[in-house]
Each structure stands twice: as structure tokens, then as C-alpha cells.
Image (tube, helix red, strand yellow):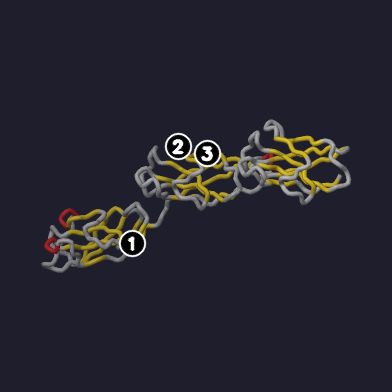
Amino acid sequence: MILRKNEIEVFITLKGGEILPNDWFGLYNASETNNKNYISYYRLADLNIILREEKTSFKLAAPRQPGDYTIRYFPNLCGYNFVSKSNTIRIINKDKLNIDLLRDPTSDNVRLKSISVSWDIHSVDVSAYDYIGLYKQESLNNNYESFQYVDLKSRYNIFEAPKEVASYHLRYHSASQSKYIDIARSDPIHIQNTDSINTVLHNGTVTVIWDIHSQPHTTWDWLGIFEEGAPNTNYLIFKYIDVNTYSAVFPGIPTGRRYEARYFSSKVGKYVDFRKSPIFST
């Protein structure tokens, strides 16, 4: 067999009296051991082969699904016992997800804002019920972060970038396949840690300026001022954050000591210091 674009050309050698019109060829996955499980079959009479020629060939549509395939020849009187098998033809996976990363210009183009994804699918017909899922790289296909049905009109979709620091990718799922099998994946998408906490000290008052992006803010998040090395339960002073601002003011900090500000996210844990400021002295 020879693969040419979207066709397979099958070459056969005919020997007089050995091949009859009702003999047939079956197309199989190369690893298939049950000869009844053909993908498609073709009677010799339907292929319009001139039987008197010693050598001839015929063409078949190549499978769209990537994988290894063979053609097996079955004389009509032999049931499902083939007498000849072709070489293996490999159909490579041409399905692709192409991504474009849009970054937030207010964060020095470090923080990812959104992900635009387009698709180039060959192995199946694209359907409005196909969907693209955003996953952490190690996640199973039933555990997406978010998903969208494909937009057939624009032929691309836009996802909000995830916030949590991790590596992700997008996966394409076809409605014609199992929903737990993806047929294409994008390149990895790496979300960096762009959180920051900084302090400004003036006349015994500490202003904490925070920019937390990797977790959603809640009114149960809080900031604390701690002496250097103090445990997380031993704060000097604390405040719940104001979700409408990105700063908090702590007056009356004793002088002559070393401190740090710590941010605690309710999504991470009440006494788990999620982010820390640099050490400062009063």
C-alpha cells in the first residue's frame, strides 16, 4: 500500500484462477486480531479491477482517524481467514489546537489575561456540540477548569486565563467520540506567580499595598503585621481586606523592630501565609 494525500493505493498481484469477483478486501486497525472487526470492506467486483491483468491496483479513501492500518485479502470461500495482508500504513494525527496568549499590559506583560484558541481538525467532522476544555496538565478529562462549545462561525474561542499558578493546556473533544477522550491538545500554558505585597513606612504607620491575582479575593481574606519569624497565629495587628481597594493602613507600629506583612487567603487556609512582603524595620 502507498498513502497519497487522502487516498491509499493498494497494489495486488493476480494469479489466474485464484481470485474471484466475490473475494473481498478488509481495512483494519493494524493491531486488530478479530477479522470480523473490519473498518470497511470492498468486494473485488465492486472495485472494477480487470482480473486478467497480472498486476493491478485500486484506490481507497484513507481513514481519517490517526493510527496504523492494514488491508487483508479474503477469498470468498475462506470466511474470515485472510490469505494475504498488506504492509502497515500510518495515518498521522494532523488535528491541532492553536493558541494565542494575550497578556495584561498593566502588569509589564507578565500576567496572562486571556487565551484565544483556534482549531484545525481533520480526523472528524466538526460539530456545534464539540467542545474545548481548559485543564491543568495532570488532570483527567472529566476534571476541566472551564469549557466552551466550539464557535463554528468565528472558528475560534476565547478563554479567560486561569489565575492559579500551574501549567495548563486546552483539549478538543468531539461529539462523535467519547466525551472522556480528547483528539487534540494545545501547547502548555504556564501561569506565573505575579502576586506582590509591598509596604510603605511613614511615622510609625505601615501601608500595605497588595496585588493578589492567583486566587479570587473574598471578604474573609486578611492581612497581618508580624514580627520577623513570628508564627502565623501571633500577629501584631490584622485587618480583613477591602475588596474594593488594594491597600490597608496599620498605624502605631512599635519602633526598633523588624516586621513583615503577610496575606492570608480564605481559599488557601486561615493561617496559611499565602504571600509575604519583604522584611522592613521601624
Q: Nearer the viewer, residue 187 or 178?
A: 178
Give me the disc on residue 89: 1
Give me the disc on residue 72: none
Q: Earlier in the sequence, mark 1 or mark 3?
A: 1
**Real-space CA distance between mark 1 and mark 3, rounded to the nearest whole angstrom:** 37 Å
Q: Residue 37: percent from the left, percent from the top?
A: 24, 56
Give the number of the mark in front: 1 or 3.
3
The residue under the point 34% across, 60% down is 68
* Quarter occupied by the C terminus: top right
Q: Which residue is mark 3?
A: 158
Kind of residue at disc 3: Ile
Q: Nearer the viewer, residue 185 or 223?
A: 223
Q: Which residue is mark 2?
A: 151
Q: Nearer the viewer, residue 167 or 3?
A: 167
**Real-space CA distance between mark 2 and mark 3, rounded to the nearest whole angstrom:** 10 Å
Q: Residue 67: percent from the left, percent from the top?
A: 36, 58
Kind of residue at disc 1: Ile
